[in-house]
Image: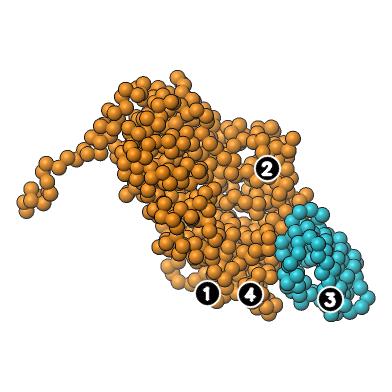
Amino acid sequence: MERLTFEYAATKSVPKRAYVGVVGSGDLEVLLEPLEDKKAYVTVRTRFDGFEQIWKDILDRFFENNDIAAKIEINDFGATPGMVSMRLLQALEVSQDDKTQR
Amino acid sequence: MDISKLTNDSRRSWTTRREKKARQIAKVQKLVNGQVIPTDKIVEALEALIMPGDCVALEGNNQKQASFLSSALNQVNPDKVNNLHMVMSSISRPEHLDIFEKGIAKLLDFSFAGPQSLRMAQMIEDGTVTVGSIHTYLELYGRLFVDLTPNIALVAADKADAQGNLYTGPNTEETPTIVEATAFRDGIVIAQVNELTDELPRVDIPGSWVDFVVVSDKPYQLEALFTRDPRQISEMHILMGMMAIRGIYERHNIQSLNHGVGFNTAAIELLLPTYGESLGLKGRICKNWALNPHPTLIPAIESGWVDSVHCFGGEVGMEKYVAARPDIFFTGKDGSLRSNRAMCQVAGQYAVDAFVGSTLQMDAYGNSSTVTLGRLAGYGGAPNMGSDPHGRRHSSDAWLNMITGESEIQRGKKLVIQMVETFQQGNKPVFVESLDAIKVGQDAKLPIAPVMVYGDDVTHVVTEEGIAYLYKAQNEEERKQALAAIAGVTPLGKESTADLKQRLRENGVIAFPEDLKVKRTDAKRSLLAARSIDDLVDWSGGLYEPPAKFRSW
């Protein structure tokens, strides 16, 4: 069991909280809450130790493209990096609630 | 011109193969009853019928195995039968390699060794097996008629009658091809059958092509390889499936196609009746298929998407369903499926708009391989379908759509679509600097690296990040950039930048879900037309009978 924390500077705010994902093998759940400060804080809990660099790569890239002020909690059950990125972007979609996108 | 000087030897016999066959068959006359070899005499019969050094085609592909005959061959005395040249589609069973350890066989020409890939690689390295070549199915079938014509064919059928007529039913697969090559150049054809009967449901192979039949102690081995349980389809597979339907199938108007076996393609099959329907695509795309009877195609068939399906082989549990849908499937007068691996490979190579497959490794130029270190899995049929056949001359919208140049002489291209997640389970990147196939090829002393699908044939790559329209890339560098742009956080993906991605998007060389109006939060399992094997049974009206390992009760 590993607990990883990451912190990023942020400029954009998101309107509302979001919860996406599945508690199940090969998946993960993501909880995203808007923050007042110009900061993003990410906590990752994972049973799979030793992948800190990949988590950092995924989150660096996510915040490079979407520098949102938010507190993000991730509970990982062995998701692939592709699944993690998809869930993060889904959480962003929900928090922005952009039903008009289609 | 004096012809008599040019003919090398007027005393030459032109019937040596025929005479050899007659001599071998004469040796077993005391063992056999007409064309029937008694079950308990099979080893003795093989020892008499097979000569050292003979070329032996042993039937076994990724589905049906002549398992009784392969285990009998494994019991022959190596002092009597040895140094055989084996020609086999698939190295699947332990005895397929045991015969090399015992010296019964020496030389091997094959296509696929998936289930034995680890031992295969070791035995080549140790020199226990000498490999002629590793082929695709069609190449191997082709060579049966050129320079690998068998002296002996050991094949499997469901039923035979006393005249040697064979019923192969839904699992006809490659039996007719092997038998034809052997029978018509004076080889000896021996068929194991599950049952001897007076009346066959239909004749798949005429008795005059068959020399002997033997009733096996138990039915031939048959694998359910093409069943994917919808429970295991993840929302990422669904997202990728939605992108493929929107960004490739719809965009290029794909009418006819082959799907490799995997969860991405299973997701697409189950999205057609729901997501595809919502896009108004029913009756417009995905009408004609070269495909095994995938249970996950049932909902698309039942909801009227599919006009026709031709099959390489059968699929365990699909027999009754297929028999009840003769408008869709190729079936015989008895009602059951007629599959034919060689014909379906031809169809999949030449006659379809698109191939959709997956792989374990892909390099920066789109070359891909399922060979990983220490394992030599071979090819099977994917390279036939996953290549652009330069002999194609008929056109279709999708084929013409791949033309990017301006010249007056142009040819279209088959769509070769690879769907891969950027990382495999266990966080191994799929996008790699160098394919393991290169090292495996060197270790096994192969003349070329065993590449499954060459990059220059690949037109599209789909990952969870987006689609790379490789056929649109101007040059090698842009191909690499397009792949990097959808390669996530793999080392290749990290070479890409936000600016570069933006430029590629504007040029239409890549597309992200938002560019295709695919919303990531819509990628839900509730979008699948069936979410379990039970759902598939329901869709089939109870006609699909899943094998025990796929049942949930």
Q: Nearer the viewer, residue B239 or B505?
A: B239
Q: Which residue is mark 1?
A: B476
Marks 1 & 3, CB-CB < 8 Å contact:
no
- Element at label 4: helix
Spatial separation of the CA atoms under disc 2 and disc 1 = 41 Å
In this view, the residue in front, B122 or B385, is B122
What kind of element bears circle 3?
Answer: strand
Looking at the image, residue B154 sits to the left or right of residue B184; the answer is right
Near mark 2 (Cα within 10 A), the count class, few <14, some 14-19 or many ≥20, is many
Q: Residue at x 34, y 39 (%)?
A: B79
Q: CA distance from mark 4 to mark 3?
A: 31 Å
Instruction: Return the x and y of residue A10 as percentages of the image width and height.
Output: 85, 78
Q: Which three-letter amino acid code belongs to the residue tagged 2? A: Pro
Number of the label disc, if any, that sits on residue B424? none
Q: Are marks 4 and 3 in contact (CB under 8 Å)?
A: no
Earlier residue among tags 1 and 4: 1
Residue A60 falls left or right of residue B299: right
Q: Which residue is mark 3?
A: A7
Closer to the observer: label 2 or label 1? 1
Can residue B517 be seen here? The reply is no
Q: Position of residue B342 (x, y in %)?
A: 45, 45
For the point 42% across and 62% down, which residue is it? B445
Hey, which quadrant is residue A7 in on the image?
Answer: bottom right
Q: Secondary structure at mark 1?
A: helix
Q: Amino acid at mark 3?
A: Glu
The residue carrying mark 4 is B504
- Report which colour depicts chain A: cyan
